[in-house]
Image: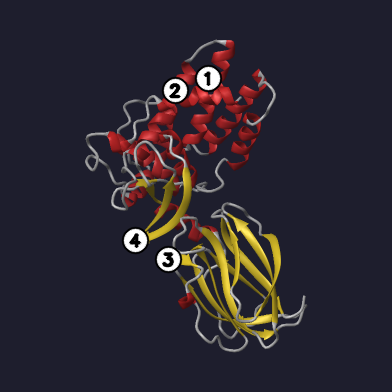
Amino acid sequence: MKKTLAILLATFLGAAIWAQEADSVGKGFITPNFKFVYGATTDTASPYYYPKLVQRFAEADTDLTIFELQAFYFGQAYQPNYSPYSAGQDEFQAIHSIMSKEEEPTRADFDSIVYYADQVIAEHPAEPMAYYYKFIGLNAIYQNYGGDTTARTQAQRQFEMLFYTIESTGNGLTTSQPFYVVSTRHEYMMLNMYGFEPKGQALIHESEHSFDLLYLQENEYGVDSLYFNIDLLMSSLSQMFDSHLDFDPEEKVSSLNLPIGTKFVIEMVKTKRKESTFRILSMEEISDTLNTRDSSLFPNPIPENRVVGYFAPARLSSDSDAVFNCLLFKSNISKDMLFMDTYIRYIGALKFEPTSNSGLMRGVLMNEMWDTSIKQIRISNIRTKE
């Protein structure tokens, strides 16, 4: 199966030219107009009405302009089933399982790849990776068994149309000319198409926009990093989770839901094992990537019976490129040890999963960290006895 993938990459990479090499770098990029996309793709009388674009793209209509293609790609963010993190997740996992098999792939394997790709396309017609994998399956069938190439050529054309749609938005070299994407999956797709390998990631907020900054391994172009505008993802993320920053400081609660990018202060009321409660004194959004060694994050001293904490992207040191989503907090509880139950929710997941019971001495920085797929945590049963 890996040989089949190599054939595909050779086919596609022959057409993918790194934007930095083009003479028009800094010229001709078309920044997507999200306000226009929303209005045009939801207006039944508009030629950009989303079902109309879906039909034209399904036919691989080569007369689609770059403005229509941008409306098609970014318009998916305004559809009821838009899910930037979980769209096609089960189907893609099934495809990856087939492609990672050690034994020689069969015709049934290739047919299954096409089947799962078509399942994604039926629900998410602007998902480029679905056409990518559909081409893999159809190309493998043709290479091994022959037959008509019409469907294979169409899948390749549809993938390339979406790839160049993203490429039309910028070159990724600066925050003023980033690539615009509707899914983090597409960030890595772009890297793979250019032959880049990531080595780290950071979440950047600048001029009221959000960016994923992907640091790159050494490459022939001398490009150190690429910026991806993720405004649509962040907007979707804020709506995805049921927790928010509204709270009643007089209410006694036993658990706390934290979306990524939150600072919180709580005051303990009871710390018994089965009856632990606290009050939420403050919760606020933060946009910076933290440094876990920054002493200014916490007041000194912390008032008694309080916990000050953050759930945010953070570097473990100022000279590190690697970014993790971290739970950082310090406490000043009357008894020495503090324990809590921590639950995590992955991007796109519907349920929290338990991770740990953490105990620490008061005044000591607690640092739990996860990769950037963890976008929400729940803390409960904060107590002084395990």
Query: How far apart are labels 4 and 2 at the CA level?
Result: 37 Å
The image shows residue 381 at horizontal and vertical percentages of 71, 74
Q: Is residue 106 above or below residue 378?
A: above
Residue 347 or 373: which is nearer the viewer?
373
Q: Mark 1–mark 3 contact, CB under 8 Å?
A: no
Name the residue beneath numbered marker 1.
Answer: 139
Residue 355 image offset from top left, x and y in percent: 69, 61
Q: CA distance from mark 1 to mark 4?
A: 43 Å
Label 1 environment density (alpha carbons within 10 Å; few <14, some 14–19, many ≥20): many
Camera-side mark, 1 or 3:
3
Q: Is residue 43 above or below residue 303?
A: above
Q: Earlier in the sequence, mark 3 or mark 4?
A: 4
The answer to whether marks 1 and 2 mark residues whose Cβ atoms lie closer than 8 Å is yes
Q: Which residue is mark 4?
A: 206
Which quadrant does the C terminus fall into? bottom right
At label 1, the amino acid type is Asn
As measured in the structure, the alpha-carbon distance from the residue carrying label 3 to the one carrying label 4 is: 10 Å
> Please, what is the three-letter code of the amino acid marked with disc 4?
Glu
Residue 59 visible here: no
Label 1 – label 3 distance at C-alpha? 45 Å
Q: Nearer the viewer, residue 318 or 369?
A: 318
